[in-house]
Amino acid sequence: MDPGISPRRAILLTLGLSTTLLGACSGSDTDMAQCPVVGSPLVSAHRGGAAYAPENTLVAFENAVRLGVDELELDTQLSADGQLVVMHDDSVDRTTDCSGAVQQLSLQQLQQCDAAYWFSPGQATTRIDETRAHPLRGKGIRIPSLDQVLDWYQTLPCPPRLSIEIKNIPGEANFDLVGGQTANVLVPLLQQRGLIENTVVQSFWPLTLTAVRQREPALQTQFLTLSDIAEPAILNLSLVIAGGHSISAPNFDAPDFNRALVALAHAANKAVIPYTVDRREDLDAVIAMGVDGVITNFPGCALQQSGRATPAKLTPDGVPDTAICR
């Protein structure tokens, strides 16, 4: 190890994350020197930065790039006609003016829904609330297919990293026991587009990540653990190590999530990127632990707390500005 490189940076380089950390411009002819050097910790915009723009939409991803994030986090699942769509829930009810299960609707049907119908700036994630303003309702914002997002992404001169979650946990309509259904579509798509080095694939379901690694060992994989059943962070790390995954992503407020656990992960050459860290005091606490990144609905807050500049306005055109932190 070069004595001039910090242990955390060395771990990231070992994991192949240097593409992001060094501001690489994969997929473009732009000279790497023209791309800004990315700061640390890595700032991942959860669902594109759901507090500032309609989650999992092109508007949100464009806004997150404008803010200067290091990673775009998004969710994907299959429509009734086998198309990968960018959607978190297994139904469209919470975020749109439509109703029904994603896997029972075709891409054409899904794209008739208003994906900004319930969005209101300042909510950590969209919640149905008629008492709030919905500034982008009726503005033509649609549920994107993953192909549409990648078409846009590959036009960027200095793209942030992609972190794509496969949605299929037990109890949801899209649950896939073996974990390979979505992986069978997603992995070839990333291979065809030359995006293996730019992408992390994440899941809460271990068999899904196993299926991904079997199809493309070069893909970085990130294991998430559920917050609502209080899974310990050490269990997450143990499964990351046992499964040969790159990144441990526990809930940030797991009782055993602390500096010692982060050090243990680094000793095993694993990166640690907790979710979903939205409050200023929580960001300060996890950054002080030496984490490699943070997943947040308020990416401007994470940028600010790590000493990086943010634009004067956090929200897209047509949306009133909101607080930078939750």
Image (cartoon, helix red, strand yellow):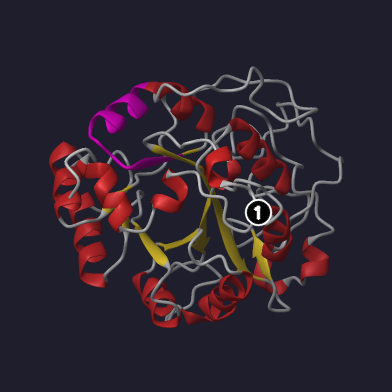
Residue hosting label 1? 29
Q: Which residues are magenta?
A: 281-295
Give the x, y percent position of residue 304. 46, 22
Residue 74 belongs to magenta span? no
Residue 320 quadrant: top right
- Label 1: element kind: loop
- The answer, for residue 187, to whether it is visible in the render is yes
Q: Is residue 277 above or below residue 79?
A: above
Tell me which corner region of the image, top left, top right, bottom left or bottom right, holds residue 276. top left
Q: Is residue 315 left or right of residue 326?
A: right
What residue appears at the point 29 percent right and 44 percent down from the top-left corner?
9
**Closest to the observer, 4 or 145:** 4
287 drawn magenta: yes
Residue 318 lies, in percent from the top left, at: 80, 27
Along the viewing direction, whichever of 112 and 100 lies nearer the viewer: 112
In the image shown, does 263 or 142 lie closer to the viewer?
263
Query: Which residue is pictured at 32% across the width and 58% down the height?
Result: 15
Can the viewer see residue 54?
no
User: Which residue is pictured at 67% across the width and 48% down the height?
Assistant: 156
* Three-letter code for the amino acid on which mark 1 is drawn: Asp
Q: Is residue 48 left or right of residue 82?
A: left
